[in-house]
Amino acid sequence: MALNFFPRARRAFSSLSEQEILALAISAEEDDSRIYKTYAEHLRGDYPDSARIFDDMAQVEDSHRRMLIDQHKRRFGDTIPFIRREYVRGFYDRKPDWLIKSMPLEKIRAQTIVMEDQARRFYRAAVTQVSDADTRKLLGDLAMAEEAHEETARALTEKHAPEDVRDEETMKERRQFVLTWVQPGLAGLMDGSVSTLAPIFAAAFATQDTKQTFLIGLSAAVGAGISMGFTEAAHDDGKLSGRGSPIKRGIASGVMTMLGGLGHALPYLIPEFWTATMVAIIVVFFELWAIAFIQNKYMETPFMRAAFQVVLGGGLVLAAGMLIGSG
């Protein structure tokens, strides 16, 4: 079968007939209704109040679709041309369903406003493309309706998700972010930064060979990252603990473990031993303070207590590595 390597040609909006403009509007409203229903289903388990907002928005878009279909039937009959937004040059895009699962709640709500604004712009442009009075009136009314949808969305938010509910949903979303990303990432960063200190600095002081020290540090960081990533992903599927996707947690833990180890291994790319060692010690200092900052920001650990624990523990491991290597 021959493959077509040329991108699909798009029609200019100005070239569309009045029937095609109506068909495009019908298709766009159908898509937006499905998107809002997808938002609702995505949010229903964790954010039922916000889910009802998108249920209502989907009903509004569906009513627009029916109005457009009725107008098409009056003017052109029952057969609606197959034309979609991606066939028209410059027409607004919509995100595919699978990206919705990675969108935070507030971004989903904001996306509603963007969608309605884009729809309003389309109807304003469409009015200039048609001459039939009834069709112009319908498209103009829909443009005005889209302009009012921002207020509708806000009103629905107040109806289904008042401020106290939104605050609770925001707190729940933040808690889930901490459980899925921050906790595994922080554990990985601590493991990578602290546990690799002793072998890297022991190797450095034992050999005083920057190349060998870098290779040892690189292997320790990569090995620890792989081990921590698989361990985090395998030991808890998240269903009972509520900690979220094991794949996401494994990635967070594995990547941060590797970065923590690489931080003080990379300076040994510098050929001069003492220069590389001083840079590595400075990097360790910043790594430990970064851990303390994350603990304070996301885990609500008092900063001075976190700093004391992390810096003291890391300093002891660093000193142990130097002593072992020097001996």
Image (cartoon, helix red, strand yellow):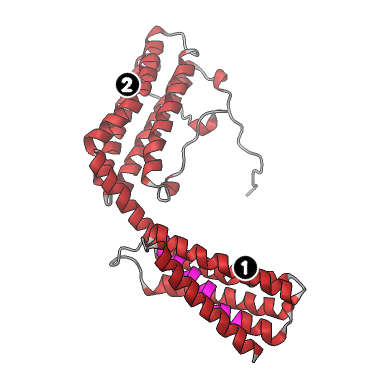
Q: Which residue is drawn at 36% across and 45% down?
A: 105
Quarter holding residue 142:
top left
Q: In the image, is 126 to the left or to the right of 258?
A: left
Residue 208 visible in the displayed image: yes
Q: Is residue 248 visible?
A: no
- As helix, strand or loop, the secondary structure at mark 2 comes to helix
User: In the drawing, what numbered circle is on residue 67?
Assistant: 2
Name the residue type under label 2: Met
Q: How far apart are marks 1 and 2 (CA)?
A: 67 Å
Residue 131 to residue 81: above or below: above
**Residues drawn in magenta:** 182-200
**Horizontal arrangement in the rendering, residue 44 relative to residue 304 (left or right):** left
Q: Mark 1 points at which residue?
A: 282
State which mark lies toward you, 1 or 2. 1
Vertical placement of 267 versus 127: above or below? below
Residue at figure coordinates x 50%, y 14% from the top left = 129
Identity of the amino acid at label 1? Ile
Q: In this view, does 257 lie to the left or right of 25?
A: right
